[in-house]
Image (tube, rainbow, N blue to C red):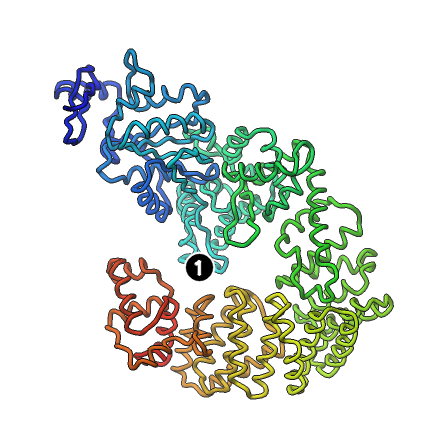
Amino acid sequence: MGRSRTCELCGAALIVRPHGGRPARYCSSACRQRALRRRAASGVAPAVPAAGGSVLPSALDSFVGRQHELSDLRSLLRRTRLLTLTGAGGVGKTRLALEFAKGLPKRFARADLVELASLQDGALLTQTLTTALGVRERAGRTGVDVLVRAIGDTSQVLILDNCEHLAEPCARLVATLLGRCPRLRILATSREALRVPGETVFRVGELTLPPADAGDDATALLRSEAVRLFVDRAASNSPGFTLHRGNGHLVAEICRRLDGLALAVELVARHVGALALSDVLAGLEDQFSQLDLLTGGSRTGPARHSGLAAAVDWSHRLLDPAEQAVFRRLSVLVGGFDTTAAQTVCTGDGIARREVFRILCALEAKSLVVRQPGERAPTRFRQLSAIRVYALERLRASGELHATLGRAFAWLTELAGRGRGEVFADQAGSPLAGERDNLASVLACGAGHGDAVRVRLTLELARVHYQQEQPSAARALLTGLLRGAGGRALGGQVPALAARVACQQADPDEALRLGEQAVRSERIRRDAAGLANALDARAAARLCRGEFAEAVADLRECLEVVASSGSPQDTAWCTHHLAWALLQAGGELEADELMSRCLPVLRQQAPWPRTAAALHTAGAVRLALGRLRSAETLFAEVLRIVPEASFHALYPVEGLALVAVESGDMQRALRLYEASAQERRRLDTEPEAPWRHRVEQAAARARTRLSAAAQEAAVAGARGLRGERLVAYALGAAGGEERTGRHVRATGRPIPLTARESTVAGLVAEGLTNRQIADRLGLSVHTVATHLDKIRDKLGLRSRTQIAVWAAARTEGGCTAPR
């Protein structure tokens, strides 16, 4: 027996057969034709279905990017019946949902969009849905019953757009419909999850941004979704606009300033033509004019999208008073924050500390704060730039700006206090390293608790800049402190740090002058820790000047002072510095004996940057003594503990290049040198002069032993080595388990690769993904994966990285088996 339905035109009963099939909407061809004529007479064109019988609005501009998201959504909708797209206002949820719906497979009979932005009364939600779906109520049936009867067992997708202000009534209705309509799927967009059982939440992130090292390379920049969207919309507003080497860096920086927020990118792109790109960027740098640039949206679009301020204001009005207070107070933390920072800065004036965590989670759920990428603990959050500007305006209007800045200042002061007691604080990890932007912003705002505290925090900010290799910023701050009475009150700390900064800037004469000033100041103060730090800074200046014997003398005195009053770690650190100076002065044997004493302590107690520096010194000493295997092992140990993207990883790479030269492997040495040099140029960092000279001399020696063709091959091979691939290649001949293919050689000759497999391996070495390789070779992704499995089996390799290393070595040596 079938289930009854009614004709959409005359209401006559229909019979739905149990064997399924596409459900009828009309009782006869006459009703179907009559309905068609009525739609034509009303001026409504018959819909062109996106899925089966869908009525979806047609976009008037192009859809840019989001291909990965569309693929993920297709996969998710096969596994869930309620899929909610969440994200900040203006991130592009609605447009993504519509683009996705237009590509739904034909098994869905229809897809319907229900826009809820203008609906303010949740009691009218059901009526709004019935109207949007063209369903008429019948006597004796409630609105929900009518919807359930109309949908029935149709395979249908219902798009509920903009649910956040009606989250509770939407959740109740969605749960009812899904429970009573077994083949219905719902795609919702909301700034927070509906929290319905079975719901899958898909967070729509910002558009991808260009990499920091893309420069003006248009090809690299256009891989960024934000850049492509900006160029597309700018060209629509100003015909003839294109991306080229002259404007690429400006477009990239504009997109970064906008955090890749889709609506913000579109709004700012509309100013191209009326304003030069440099003026647009300057406007975004000014928080007072930034909101002006983020206005002027489409007159025909939703009111909440008339400008980004309007979009954020829409979300702000949905917050309760406590949430609004925390939202605006967080705006002073321009560099992001963890929960402790949020609790400290937002507590007070009616907000209890214990409430802040709950409110922070609520703001994150409503997409008004976002989690920063990465897995570091504690979890950090931030407000997107445009949202933070709006929140700061609300903070000013509330009259709470001064009090909130005061709490931020007190929090930063407490953090700075955790680093006190460090003898060599300039070279230790600052507790404020992760809060550099917050510290700079709060100091610039003028809030504080007195000149002494302000001077202390200014020194801490300069220290962070020095440790992050930003000497110009550090020097500007230190110059101000050296001129003021507050800086002099800190004794030799300011000139000691200034001496180190001058070394960073290759200004050895100024470095020595400042180092001597620091030592004089600390001898007068009779502060042992301060004197040790000053002597260490002056020794650094003398090393920069090539005065190795004088540097050794300073460091011997420093070691005596520290040994009598410092910690074992401080003593070990100073011992390491003395060993480095002795190495430059020709005292390799004493340096080796000193490193054997201090290295175990640093391995056990010191943070990784200090341990890495000491291991590097120990490796350089062993290299000078001709103990190549030991040196290689030490340099490899450094590579295993430093972050791959850090400039710290370049020292051991260069050390391994030196080992390769001494071992006679000139092509490997030159490739390592060139790869390190290109990374140093990209990161804009240089090693200390003695080390740089030694590495450059070794590279020159390698070149003299190689033919022109071999030199070109080494340089070409270095271009593809960066980050993980550079580390893998450097470790590939550094012994131990890292040596690629060792177990293959132990079991006999490897099976040769086919020509296609060799090509795939070469493309892996170039850094291409399986999809990119498939596109390049005209294969399917599955076929590429099969080739990779065969390559692993034939060569006895375990990972993609090892394949890349093998392919690079094959190119270098012209061989057909792992080296």
Determine the residue located farthest toward the right in the rendered image.
Answer: 524
Query: As displayed, is residue 688 above or below residue 431?
Result: below
The residue under the point 32% across, 31% down is 158
Name the residue that disc number 1 marks: 217
Residue 254 visible in the displayed image: yes
Quadrant for the N terminus in the image = top left
The quarter holding residue 728 reads bottom left
Q: In screen coordinates, is 528 left or right of 27?
A: right
Q: Amino acid at mark 1?
A: Asp
The residue under the point 35% across, 60% down is 769
Please name whichever residue, 673 or 82, is drawn nearer the observer in this view of the structure: 82
Spot occupied by residue 203 in the image (x, y as percentages of width and height): 43, 42
Q: In screen coordinates, is 381 left or right of 746?
A: right
- SS of the residue under disc 1: loop
Quadrant for the C terminus in the image = bottom left
Spot occupied by residue 606 in the image (x, y as percentages of width and height): 64, 67
Spot occupied by residue 352 in the image (x, y as percentages of width and height): 66, 35
The residue under the point 50% across, 57% down is 212
Query: As displayed, is residue 816 above or below residue 388?
Result: below
Spot occupied by residue 719 in the image (x, y as percentages of width and height): 43, 70
The residue under the point 64% across, 46% down is 341
Please name whichever residue, 134 or 225, is drawn nearer the observer in this view of the structure: 134
Query: As displayed, is residue 557 above or below residue 799?
Result: below
The quarter holding residue 541 reads bottom right
